[in-house]
Every structure is written in C-alpha cells, then in structure tokens.
Amino acid sequence: MRKYVILGVQGSGKGTQSAMLADDLDLVHISVGDIFRWHVKRHTKLGAQVRRLVAAGELVGDDLVEDVVRDRLQLHDWNYGFIIDGFPRNRRQAEFFLESYDIDGVIHLDLPDEEVRRRVLARRLCSRCGMDYNLIAHRPETEGRCDVCGGELVSREDDSPEVLARRLEEYHSKIDPVVELFRRKEYVMTIDARADKAAVQRTIRTRFNLPPYLPSQEEPVRLSG
Ligand code: AMP
C-alpha cells in the first residue's frame, strides 16, 4: 500500500505526475479540483455551492473540502494506495489530514512563479471531452480543436492572468505552513519541477524508492486538472 500527497502550485505538473504514478503503480489518483469540476459541469448541488469559488480560483471552505476528501477515501477503492492532489491547501486541512490518515510521503513540486505563468497561460482544455493540451508542450494538430473528438479547446476559467496572480499569492501564503507541518514528520521531498515531465517522474521515483519509470509505456490519459 502506497499513500502519497502531491503539493505544488498550479501548472507545476501535479496532475500529470500523479497520473504517471497512478497509472503503473495502480494507485487511485484523487484530485479535489477534478471532483469539484465534475460537480460544476453536472450541475449537482455541490457544484452549485462551489461554482463561483472554483471559477475565481478561490479556496472552497475547509468543511466542505474535508467532507469531499473523507467521502472519497471512504470508498476504499484504493487497494494499492492513492495519490491525493490539490489537498491539503492550508494548515487546517493539513492538520485534519494528519489526524485522520497516515501517508508514506509528500511530493512537493517546486516551480518559480515566472515559469508557472508561462505554463498556465498556455493551457487549453477540450470543452467536449476534457482532454488537456498545452500550447508549449502538447499542441493540438489543428489549432483550437481537440485531436480526439474535434471539440473546441478553451482555457480553464481560472487560468486567466488575474486569477493566476491571486492564486499564486494565496498559494505562497497558505502552502508554506503546510509544507513546514509535513516537514516536521520528515517525509517531504521537494522536487525541482522545471525539468521535462519524464525527468521529474524519474526523480520522484528515485527519491521515494519506487520502481523505475519506463518511458516506453503508453502515456496515461489525463482529463483536466
Ligand atoms: P485545482 O484543480 O487543484 O487547481 O483546484 C481547482 C479549484 O478547486 C481551486 O481553485 C479551488 O477553488 C478548489 N479546490 C481544490 N482543492 C481545494 C482545497 N484543498 N481546498 C479548497 N479549495 C480547493
């Protein structure tokens, strides 16, 4: 059983690295942001509660987030473990998590703000099937159209320069205490996230003594986040 938390600013590759780990280690990838986006898209009651905050890039209330995480982990569909992405985002969430679950490690992806801006503003998402693109690293074959389903590519509502600036500020003020709290337990590995995704994945695996990443494996499909 392997249980990890992955922390990192928007655009640091949390979703991609989590999907690469989850794919061949059979971990369940739990992205709190994806859960919220799923609810917003399907107009559920929870979706209505969080829609405005998610679009503005503001944090959803801790009680609600904790309920979502607890309910998700209670499904116990993670026989080989899980990797949780986008949580905890502040000290209180970290304390809740540490009281309720034990984890094997925290993967802390570190990326300078300037690089975050460059990456995030290039992100696109298929409005029909949710496939991710990036105008720097993963361009669609036809501009503005999804390679898989032909749907229109759009930016995530929270990937605008204004929202990003606010999120970066919020991220730094809230996440540093979380990293400190986890560090006291000595299982945080800070990883330089500027390298390409295969190199970052290799570093994560070396640092956590995991089986090596085999680049010949088929790319895991990532839907948003
Ligand atoms: P993400 O995909 O991780 O960037 O999350 C997208 C949005 O979901 C965030 O901007 C928040 O509005 C909400 N969200 C995700 N995770 C959390 C969390 N741990 N605490 C509060 N809000 C969250």
Image (spheres, grey):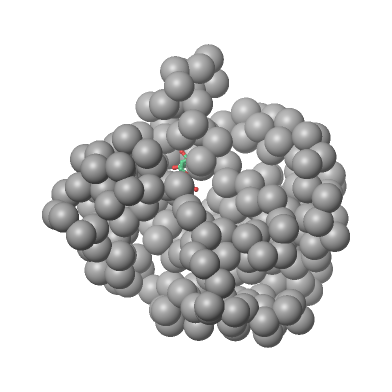
Using residue 77 as the reference point, say whether residue 133 is left or right of it. Answer: left
Q: Position of residue 28 (x, y in %)?
A: 69, 50
Residue 177 in the image: above or below residue 188? above
Q: Position of residue 2 (x, y in %)?
A: 80, 62
Residue 109 appearing in the image: yes
Question: Who is closer to the viewer here, 91 or 110?
Answer: 110
Q: Is residue 152 left or right of residue 219?
A: left
Please state which of residues 29 and 85 is positioned toward the viewer in this rendering.
29
Instruction: Report which quarter residue 23 is drawn in.
Output: bottom right
Residue at the spot 67% in from the left edge and 65% down from the top edge: 24
What percent of the width, then of the height, locates residue 10? 42, 57
Relative to residue 137, is residue 152 depicted above or below? above
As displayed, is residue 197 above or below residue 81? below
Picture quadrant where residue 136 is located: bottom left
Identify the residue at horizontal 42%, vertical 35% (top origin).
54
Q: Is residue 47 above or below residue 140?
A: above
